[in-house]
Image (cartoon, helix red, strand yellow):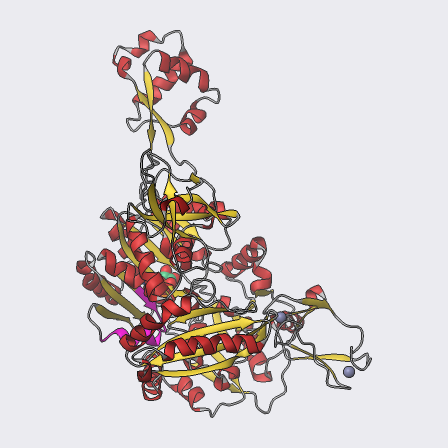
């Protein structure tokens, strides 16, 4: 009997170990292919890692695989290497990382759809004067003539245009050997040659500096004020790479308001791009992934996970708005797409281009390192510079729809001068607080330590953390008092209030509740693009990325929360948001203004925001971080646990801490906790955390290397579970 062959597999479960199975006879055992594997009393999908190693197990105990799902690898050798790096760096199970790298469509047992097409060309017999041969078959002659005019060949789609009933004549011609088909890979579409804007002096200089470095690894930070033409620089570099036969991944934080960008890319690159984001179906995203993998699309434009698009000739990764937090995945496999992109570029020896008007403190701090370069764009190609931030003191004023009288007056002025107005309020719904005046009862979520938000449009109280919702109570559930009031303001109420106040212009709301309908979003964006006066109201979605030249006033309604936040990142985030929001205004031929409402105009950060540039503020914040020993001057690793009781979560983290404490270099790092998490109860589970901080990352690594093998086997007991977050965002 022939010896069975064994292979190791990573499976899509949060388990750190890999599993061995026996392969069928004759299996080629290609690393990166998917198999159905028996697992317990069910089956699961696994990815073959390697084979023909000496097994640690008794051969008769190793189960055979159920079925091989792929003929060719779905994870190429480079992606396998990158996944191993992610698993190791972020301490995440390899199986989970590998399945994260695949489009959702391929995470189960679905087979790869074929993207091959039949392409017909003239056959060997066609050289014998087909005209006379086919004189009595005009339909066949038509097809032969079309093929003679197109040496690349024609597909079924092309034939359909020539003759809807193309099957019969084509079959006859094939029999006569006048034509034949071959299976062909879809070809990449030709690039159009649009008229390009003349580059500014600054843009040209930057291109001249970056272009000679495109064949090697480098992290290029394009630090350019809002509206300075960063996108134009990306597009030129992308074109350069495509012309060199390479492919490009272009990441953006959110696709919501980027329809403008998609149009711009379409004009530049025709059909040569693929798009992937969470608004698309699994099949659509898979097709995009496949088109890019096959080289049919030169550009992959998308959100975070598009970074895992595979290509054998990747030549550049662009990360727009590199400071944006949406590049961090906060559940499942925790990773930062910007940091993984830099690693990927380094492995492939290609450049990565990071762009932002408000670069992250991490990237600014990295500028001192080898292979990091900064380029600055200090002016807009258009008429006006981004507006300074003007503070509106609301400590003593009565607010009407969340706006001070001075703010409303300014909105009126801009509308009168036919400008568009953008109002940023990072709170969706109608009102964030619902309470009884009689007894003090407040509407709280049953599952979370959080208030319920009033959503008037659907007459419900909704939890923004778990989605729990209930109808509006007729009377106070505690004392029966019928007058229940709401406080505070969300985008829904703002839209309503402004609509009453400015009935002559449309008020467009854009937030997660609206964006659920693509059509509603499209309509609103069309109105904005039309350039007529209107008011745009929305959450963080409207704060970034877009370029609507008629917007002349940007207003931030409530900036104060960040001043008293427990997060050490709050100041950085606030500065980024305010400069981004302000930067949406004054992009056209009207000078822009930006207002920030605050109850604390004298707060040092507010004063800095008013007077200084982002770069100066960032430099100050970096100094602060250094003196407190916070990231990026220290590295943070966070263990989190959750359970049905707080006690269980805390106990699990204590066990983890004990394992860490046994490591050789433990005394060289600081360990904070375990402590209950800031929002202790969320989605029905109690949460606690344990934070490790070290100035020297090698110390952190060494402790984790010592302790992880034991920690990986720690089951919660009593349904507690834990996760680990390397380079944790918030402590
Ligand atoms: P950023 O990405 O820095 O916010 P964009 O690339 O979107 O800026 O440019 C802002 C606006 O300026 C866009 O409308 C763009 O078409 C225009 N623009 C960019 N570069 C030039 C240029 N060299 N000449 C004229 N207009 C330009
Ligand atoms: Zn009451
Ligand atoms: Zn909840």
| Residue 237 location (% of width, % of height) | 27, 56
Quarter of image, ligand 2: bottom right
| Residue 719 location (% of width, % of height) | 56, 67
| Residue 292 location (% of width, % of height) | 35, 46
- The answer to which of 62 and 153 lies nearer the viewer is 62
- The answer to which of 331 and 223 lies nearer the viewer is 331
Q: Residue at x 25, y 69 (%)?
A: 375
The residues colored magenta run: 354-368
Quarter of the figure with residue 82:
bottom left
Quarter of the figure with residue 666:
bottom left
Q: Would residue 364 be counted in the magenta stretch?
A: yes
Quarter of the figure with residue 342:
bottom left
Q: Residue at x 24, y 61 (%)?
A: 346
- The answer to which of 556 and 698 lies nearer the viewer is 698
Q: Residue at x 60, y 63 (%)?
A: 513
- Where is 68 relative to 574, above or below? above
- Where is 124 relative to 728, above or below? above
């Amino acid at each position: 009997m022939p010896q069975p062959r064994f292979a190791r597999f990573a499976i899509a479960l949060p388990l750190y170990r890999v599993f061995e199975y026996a392969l069928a006879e004759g299996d080629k055992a290609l690393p990166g292919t998917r198999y159905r594997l028996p697992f317990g009393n069910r089956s699961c999908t696994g990815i073959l890692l390697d084979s023909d190693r000496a097994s640690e197990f008794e051969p008769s105990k190793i189960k055979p695989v159920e079925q091989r799902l792929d003929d060719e690898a779905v994870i190429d050798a480079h992606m396998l290497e990158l996944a191993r790096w992610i698993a190791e760096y972020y301490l995440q199970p390899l199986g989970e990382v590998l399945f994260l790298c695949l489009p959702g469509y391929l995470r189960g047992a679905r087979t790869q759809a074929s993207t091959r097409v039949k392409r017909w060309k003239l056959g060997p017999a066609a050289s014998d004067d087909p005209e006379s041969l086919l004189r009595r078959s005009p339909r066949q002659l038509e097809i032969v003539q079309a093929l003679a005019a197109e040496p690349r060949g024609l597909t079924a789609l092309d034939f359909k245009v020539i003759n809807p009933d193309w099957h019969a004549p084509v079959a006859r011609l094939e029999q006569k050997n006048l034509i034949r088909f071959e299976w062909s890979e879809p070809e990449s579409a030709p690039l159009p040659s649009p008229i390009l804007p003349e580059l500014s002096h600054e843009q040209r200089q930057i291109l001249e500096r970056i272009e000679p470095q495109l064949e090697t690894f480098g992290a290029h930070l394009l630090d350019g004020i809002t509206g300075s033409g960063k996108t134009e620089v990306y597009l030129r570099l992308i074109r350069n790479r495509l012309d060199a036969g390479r492919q490009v991944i272009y990441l953006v934080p959110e696709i919501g308001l980027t329809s403008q960008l998609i149009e711009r890319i379409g004009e530049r690159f025709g059909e040569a791009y693929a798009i992937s984001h969470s608004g698309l179906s699994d099949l659509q995203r898979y097709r995009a992934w496949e088109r890019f993998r096959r080289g049919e699309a030169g550009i992959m434009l998308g959100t975070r996970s598009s970074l895992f698009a595979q290509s054998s000739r990747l030549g550049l990764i662009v990360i727009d708005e590199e400071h944006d937090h949406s590049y961090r995945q906060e559940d499942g496999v925790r990773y930062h797409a910007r940091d993984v992109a830099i690693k990927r570029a380094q492995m492939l020896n290609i450049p990565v281009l990071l762009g932002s008007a408000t670069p992250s403190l991490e990237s600014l701090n990295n500028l001192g390192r080898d292979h990091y370069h900064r380029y600055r764009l200090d002016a807009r190609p258009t008429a006006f510079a981004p507006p300074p931030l003007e503070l509106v003191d609301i400590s003593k004023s009565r607010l009407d729809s969340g706006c001070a009288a001075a703010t409303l007056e300014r909105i009126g002025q801009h509308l009168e001068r036919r400008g568009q107005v953008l109002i940023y309020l990072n709170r969706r719904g109608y009102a964030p607080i619902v309470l009884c005046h009689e007894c003090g009862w407040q509407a709280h979520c049953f599952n979370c330590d959080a208030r319920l938000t009033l959503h008037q449009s659907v007459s419900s109280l909704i939890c923004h953390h778990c989605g729990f919702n209930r109808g509006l109570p007729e009377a106070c559930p505690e004392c029966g008092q019928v007058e229940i009031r709401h406080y505070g303001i969300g985008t829904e109420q703002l839209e309503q209030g402004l609509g009453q106040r400015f009935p002559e212009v449309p008020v467009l709301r854009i937030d997660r509740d609206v964006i659920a309908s693509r059509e509603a979003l499209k309509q609103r964006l069309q109105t904005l693009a039309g350039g007529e006066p209107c008011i745009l109201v929305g959450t963080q979605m409207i704060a970034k990325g877009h370029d609507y030249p008629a917007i002349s006033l940007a207003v931030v309604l409530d900036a104060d929360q960040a001043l008293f936040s427990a997060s050490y990142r709050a100041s950085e985030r606030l500065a980024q948001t305010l400069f981004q929001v302000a930067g949406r205004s004054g992009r056209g031929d009207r000078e822009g203004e930006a207002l920030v409402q605050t109850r604390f105009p004298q707060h040092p950060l507010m004063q800095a925001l008013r007077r200084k540039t982002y770069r100066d503020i960032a430099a100050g914040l970096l100094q602060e971080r250094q003196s407190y020993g916070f990231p990026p001057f220290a590295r943070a690793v966070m263990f989190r646990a959750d359970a049905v009781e707080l006690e269980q979560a805390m106990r699990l983290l204590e066990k983890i801490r004990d394992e860490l404490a046994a490591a050789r270099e433990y005394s060289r790092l600081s360990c904070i906790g375990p402590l209950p998490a800031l929002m202790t109860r969320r989605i029905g589970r109690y949460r606690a955390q344990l934070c490790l901080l070290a100035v020297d990352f090698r110390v952190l690594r060494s402790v984790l290397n010592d302790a992880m093998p034991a920690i990986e086997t720690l089951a919660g007991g009593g349904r507690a579970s834990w996760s680990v977050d390397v380079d944790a965002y918030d402590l």
